[in-house]
Amino acid sequence: MTPDDPDALAVIQGIKEGMEVQITVAKPRNAKFHRKYFALLNTAYELWDCPIGVEGASKDLKAFRGEIIVLSGYRDMVVKLDGTVKYTPRSISFGKMTEDEFGKLYSSSVDVILSKVLTNYKRADLDNAIQKVMNFT
């Protein structure tokens, strides 16, 4: 069994034989809801008509996911060396968010996607597209 969370999977894969590790066990969030969130992000990404106008630029799923999380308000502010501010997405791993926080992130992400990415979609259209994806997983 592997974790659904990419951050957790990366940590587990980084454990080498003989390494000393400390494990914290926490009550997990609803895994199905977590998968639904990734279905939301992946569906929006696939349906997104990316306005690529810069030579050599391409769509990037990881960057897209991060941008949605940042625009949804789940972010940290980082000051760069030149004094400018950059926002980075917070981790949405099971150990970093409560179920309630995750529900708020999901709702806010839907709002961001409908207002900035899939502007011709209604909530019901997006919900139907997500449900189709969920039925295949």
Image: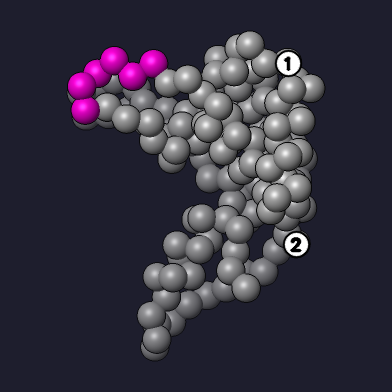
Residue with the mark numbered 2: 27
Magenta span main SS: loop
* Residue at (74% x, 22% y) in the render: 125
Magenta stretch containing residue 52, yes or no? yes
Colouring scheme applied when the structure was drawn: one colour
Q: Nearer the viewer, residue 105 or 76?
A: 105
Q: Is residue 108 above or below residue 8?
A: above
Give the extent of the magenta segment: 51-56
The dot on residue 122 is 1
Q: Secondary structure at mark 1?
A: loop
Q: Would residue 107 appear left or right of 46 to someone viewing this image?
A: right
Q: Residue at x 53, y 32 (%)?
A: 46
Disc 2, SS: loop
Res 73 visible: no
Q: Quadrant of the N terminus?
A: bottom right
Residue 30, how many percent across, how many down? 77, 53
Type of the residue with mark 2:
Lys
> Viewer-proximal residue, 115 or 103?
115
